Amino acid sequence: MPQQPLGVALIGTGFMGKSMAMAWRNVATVFGGAHPGLAILCDQTPDLAERFAKQFGFARASADWRAVVADPAVDVVSITTPNGWHRPMAEAALAAGKHVWLEKPMALTLEDAEAMTAAAAAHPGQITLLGYNYLRNPAFQAARHLVASGAIGKPLQFRGIYDEDYGADPAQAWSWRHARATGGLGALGDLACHLVSQMLALMGPVASVTALTQIAIPTRPSPDGAKPVENEDSVVALIEFSSGAQGSFASSRVALGRKCRLQWEVQGSEGTIIFDQENMNEFWLHRRGEAGFTRHLSGPEQPDFAAFCPAPGHNFGFNEQKIIEARDFLSAIAGGAETGPNFAQGLVIERIIHAMARSEGRPIML
Ligand code: NAD
């Protein structure tokens, strides 16, 4: 008897809803295995749900997320709603026996993230995965492998930046992202958490952070008049790693001219590696004795690149990272190794960004 395909429910059809829909539709095409069954598409209204169920190729549509996560045809729930919905939706899905693929950040508050981690621990047979897609970029994986294998010696310093300018226009309308009750943290929850995920993968655990945050644009226009921005537009921080290495760290959502400057450098005792997500198909490496930096362009020698394309230099993209993430999620569900970050590993990221948020220039031990 052929096995039933895994039943997928996807909640949310915005930026990341579309990205996860593409991942679910393409994961078996790229990596093989059984195609997941696209069971239910959920959004806030029946109109939205029906429109996107057709567009994304889901069998059914629903505007009732509680019914969706409890539906017996659903084995896994993809959650791409605004941050305030993450905890109730993830906890309900776990309680209903489902695997959960959740967009970052985990939640609005550290307490929420702790409760979600406890909920996941209470269901050890169910896989959780957070949407830290930049970890899946083949160029990042290759650079991380070089650091881990000692190619640049002992890591001494990390310099990390994640800047975008999507919030730089003061005329930009107030949205759920600007309120603590619906967005949680600002640049820290939206952007910096990605940089933390890469920093941990490259440098290992963090011992302490010392940070300053800033709200650059204190109000935003809304149909009801100017509304206050309650969370940080930017952050700067110093990092002390458990290994003894040091780091500097900055992130902003109001950095004019910057689009996806997820950029870092690891300086080691024997060399330096540089990466910038705006040029996501390459990293640069210098080793002691070389004249300068050498460009390492992504190509089929990186297995996750080869799965998409046999030709070097033909470039890999943002949404393709999500397809690799879907592969890793399915592999863990099938009993393979968990690549994470799962909720417990995501909680470590949340502890760091919330420590930065409350530091006000004082060192916070982690
Ligand atoms: P978005 O506003 O584009 O989409 C949100 C979607 O959720 C919309 O379709 C909205 O109608 C739907 N929604 C809201 N409340 C709902 C409810 N109660 N029931 C059902 N549907 C509901 O937002 P986005 O940019 O896609 O961000 C969503 C999440 O993805 C956020 O947590 C954000 O931090 C994260 N995100 C991650 C990345 C990444 O690189 N991993 C990039 C962007 C956003």
Image (cartoon, rainbow, N blue to C red):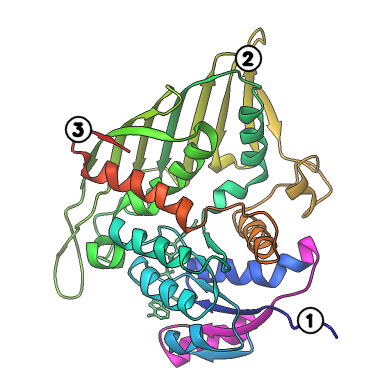
User: What amino acid does circle 1 point to?
Assistant: Gln
Disc number at residue 131?
none
Disc number at residue 3?
1
Q: Is residue 268 above or below residue 262?
A: above
Tell me which numbered mark, 2 or 1, is placed earlier along the sequence.
1
User: What amino acid does circle 3 point to?
Assistant: Arg
Q: Is residue 159 left or right of residue 215?
A: right
Measured in 3D between alpha carbons, the distance from the residue under mark 3 to the one under mark 2, in whole angstroms, is 38 Å
Kindly identify which residue carries mark 3: 362
Q: Position of residue 323 (x, y in %)?
A: 66, 61
Q: Nearer the viewer, residue 24 or 363?
A: 363
Q: In terms of secondary structure, where does tag 2 sit?
A: loop
Q: Is residue 250 left or right of residue 199?
A: left
Is residue 4 visible to us here? yes
Kindly identify which residue carries mark 2: 292
- Looking at the image, is mark 3 or mark 2 nearer the viewer? 3
Q: In terms of secondary structure, where does tag 1 sit?
A: loop
Q: Position of residue 230 (x, y in %)?
A: 19, 57
Is residue 109 visible to us here? no
Q: Which residues are magenta?
A: 29-57
Quarter of the image that includes the N terminus? bottom right
Residue 207 covered by magenta stretch: no
Tell me which numbered mark, 1 or 3, is placed earlier along the sequence.
1
Q: Residues within 10 Å of mark 3 (few under 14, many from 20)?
A: some
Residue 37 covered by magenta stretch: yes
- Looking at the image, is mark 2 or mark 1 nearer the viewer? 1
